Amino acid sequence: MLANSDGQLQGVAPAQHNPLNFLQERLEALKGKNRYRRLRAVESAQDAWVMLEGRKVLNLCSNNYLGLASHPDVKETAAQAIREWGCGSGASRLICGTQSYHQILERRLAAFKGAGAALLYTSGYMANLGIISSLVSEGDYVFSDQFNHASIIDGCRLSGAEVLVFPHNNMEALEEKLRRTSGQSSRKLIVIDSVFSMDGDLAPLPDLVNLAQKYECLLMIDEAHATGVLGPGGRGAVSLFGLEDRVPIVMSTLSKSLGSLGGFATGSKELIDYLINTSRSFIFSTAMPPGVVFAALAALDVLDANPSLPLQVQENANYLRNGLKKMGYDTGNSQTQIIPIVIGEAAPTLEMSRFLLEEGVLATPIRPPTVPEGTCRIRTTVMATHTRQDLDFALSAFERAGQKMKVI
Ligand SMILES: *Cc1c(COP(=O)(O)O)cnc(C)c1O
């Protein structure tokens, strides 16, 4: 027996202090700064309208930009795939987890992005960790925009390379940093989002290509929010600028516009071969399950058959952004389906979000560490499946919220 009659474990001293006591303190500190977060469950499928805690509300914060997460063809294809192939993939890709459908999707994604090859990761987060840490290491340099996504930041940290953060979209500051490190034999990587996730503005891709060329740097673009929305047929911002042949490393996700889950890298066959052999978040993780892979394939079919879907997102974004601006809201430099309304401090941002929810609009507050101190915001996103009526409903809620909060 491991325990004696008092329930005491044999050979284990009685517990005297709880090493997890710091958790409560940390949580209280977050509450004190209005940074405490809790999970709220949506009780319906991801659509333009969702059920939240028993109420039907307009969803104005989803990344399901094309509405494909609940598209009938996507659901049916995934369901059939699960019936035929099962739910799990059984192993990591290099053991026996690679199945024919992974390679079909990879060829499809490579063609979609105008690249030689593609490689799937189980999330966009994993893709950024795996790609960046494979390409640079201790003794190398990474140049990273101040507003890059957390997964890029973590990938840079994991790599062990020296990270040089430049002010948001500031090409002069980037060039200054490139100049200071030029002439050294170390490898250099510039990494940046093409559409910034909390601001909805675009990176100056042509300038970045030119700087990477001039200073003989690697260039990696994260297309998480551009794929499915920008460029011809939703191929992304790299494609919008016609730079497919000039950006050697592109990362993207299946989890936003493409309606399911996963990340992927596209580039030359050699790049992908290298990642297969060195990228630890690819190597040491179970392959994507069939339902998810087939959902992505079906999403690409829907996108191909409906080339106006990306335009519908952009049109809806212009309508909402113009409406908000006309009311006097500051939407920053947003040029895309991501439209931030910067409030400033956390407390009024939370109050605004609560008020919008009472009005039937789900628009989540974004606080540090996701955005810099003093730039808390309501981040709104539009979908192709929002109707004009939905957007008008949102605008009238924003009008009342803005007047009540005295921000317009
Ligand atoms: C969402 C996002 C990711 C992570 O992708 P997931 O598939 O959600 O893990 C990476 N980069 C950017 C810019 C993102 O917005």
Image: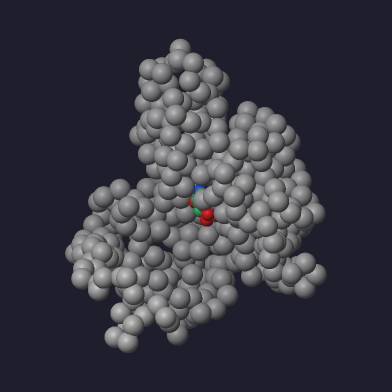
Q: Is residue 122 visible?
A: yes
Residue at 61% from the left image edge and 38% from the top image edge: 278
Q: Quadrant of the C terminus?
A: bottom left
The chosen color scheme is one colour
Q: Nearer the viewer, residue 401 or 124?
A: 124
Coordinates of residue 130 in the picture (x, y in percent): 55, 43
Residue at 60% from the left image edge and 59% from the top image edge: 261
In this rendering, position of residue 267 left or right of residue 130: right
Residue at 37% from the left image edge and 26% from the top image edge: 173
Q: Quadrant of the N terminus?
A: bottom left
Query: Residue lying farthest bottom?
Result: 5
Relative to 28, is 254 above or below? above
Coordinates of residue 109 in the picture (x, y in percent): 71, 47
Q: Specify the quadrant of the image occupied by residue 75.
A: bottom right
Q: Specify the quadrant of the image occupied by residue 333.
A: top left
Circle count: 0
Q: Nearer the viewer, residue 38 or 318?
A: 38
Query: Residue lying farthest top?
Result: 183
In this rendering, position of residue 116 left or right of residue 395: right
Q: Is residue 65 visible?
A: no
In this rendering, position of residue 254 left or right of residue 398: right
Coordinates of residue 232 in the picture (x, y in percent): 68, 44
Q: Nearer the viewer, residue 326 or 192?
A: 192
Residue at 71% from the left image edge and 55% from the top image edge: 97
